[in-house]
Amino acid sequence: MKKHNFYAGPSILSQYAIDNTIEAIRDFDNMGLSILEISHRSKQFQAVMDKAQALFKELLDIPEGYEVLFLGGGASTQFAMVPYNLLKTKAAYLDTGTWAHKAIKEAKLFGEVNVVASSEQDNYVYYPTKFEVPTDVDYLHITTNNTVYGTELRRDLDVPVRMVADMSSDIFTRPIDVSKYDLIYGGAQKNLAPAGVTFVIVKVDALGKVDRAIPTMLNYETHVKKGSMFNTPPVLPIYTALKTLEWYKELGGVKALQQIDEEKARVLYDAIDNSRMFVGTVNPDSRSIMNVCFVMKPEYKELEQEFIDFAGTKGIMGIKGHRSVGGFRASLYNALPLDSVKVLTAAMKEFENNH
Ligand SMILES: *Cc1c(COP(=O)(O)O)cnc(C)c1O
């Protein structure tokens, strides 16, 4: 049976990326060797790294003066690396959910943290947009898409300070004005590659301004200088990332992806809004187009597990909500076809008719 992959991360990849990765594991670049067993310093892999960085810059229209890094450690390591490298005395953070919360915890190890707004008291059902940012902070840290609760900021804020953004789960879903940011990072396992590689877009000028000593591997300058080759980079995930980027370019780039993504989200949110049984959990003006969170209305609450099982019989995978929210979460990452969303909405309708 055809499977429809709604997992939140690691998550669906394009068939193009998977097929090419399989081929590179068998025989990489006609070397007669697997990509798994060759030097990362071979000219063949260096070409992969160079192309991936160049295509990343091209697709996001990244201005001069920025570098794209591919590191290990996940987005969670960035929670500490960002303040380690950029926080001199004080930083502002926006608390929009689980991941933002973790970023704040790490930043407090390095200086004063000013949480400019939080939607925690309302269980993160909206994305706070009304707040003041003090002008004396080193940066404002935001998490553009709240993967767990399903809220998203779909624009670049106008604030009087430089921004740093965790874009783990909504990178490549809209054009970004990168010039407003000193740094953008994310784990690649949501919209780019298998787990194991973390992307960082960094303004080179923003580095080297803190007084503290930074361990070599945690210093962005190390990786800028060495082109993400100071140590062995996550070779295979970087290869898959390159294939995903090629596929994005073929589809028409981020503007085309934005249209496709918005259409997919519209189809699902319409089904939820027109349902007798299901209801969305976040405020409509904060809805994520990547992670759609919904539950059953109180009178049907006990049917939630039954729906997950029913959906499973239709090949629908990974819609169980995060343990901190419950209900359902359907992740609509770039590689998920519109057809899969239609299979889900048809299953919702059928289940509703049966009850
Ligand atoms: C998944 C996720 C993370 C954590 O990523 P890891 O690579 O597992 O450390 C951080 N931030 C956001 C927004 C995420 O969705």
Image: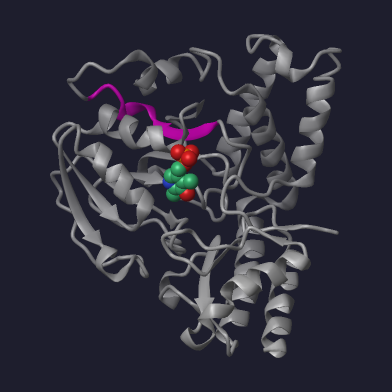
Quarter where residue 158 is shown:
bottom left
| Horizontal relation, residue 4 to residue 51: left or right | right
**Quadrant location of the C terminus in the rendered image:** bottom right
Q: Does the magenta portion include 217? A: no
Quarter where residue 54 is shown:
top right
| Horizontal relation, residue 255 to residue 107: left or right | right
| Horizontal relation, residue 41 to residue 174: left or right | right
Q: Is residue 162 visible?
A: no
Residue 251 percent coordinates (x, y): 73, 51
In this rendering, is residue 230 above or below 175?
Answer: above
Residue toward you, 60 or 31: 31
| Residue drawn at (65%, 16%) of the image | 46
Q: Does the magenta portion include 201? A: yes
Q: How is the image coloured?
A: one colour
Residue 25 percent coordinates (x, y): 78, 24
Q: Is residue 198 visible?
A: yes
**Quadrant location of the N terminus in the rendered image:** bottom right
| Residue drawn at (81%, 19%) of the image | 29
| Horizontal relation, residue 321 to residue 54: left or right | left
Residue toward you, 270 or 139: 270
| Residue drawn at (27%, 18%) of the image | 214
Magenta stretch: give its range. Answer: 197-209
In this rendering, is residue 159 above or below 30?
Answer: below
In this rendering, is residue 185 above or below 221?
Answer: below
Quarter where residue 239 is shown:
top right
Residue 107 percent coordinates (x, y): 24, 38
| Residue drawn at (45%, 74%) of the image | 281
Residue toward you, 27 or 260: 27
Residue 233 percent coordinates (x, y): 56, 20
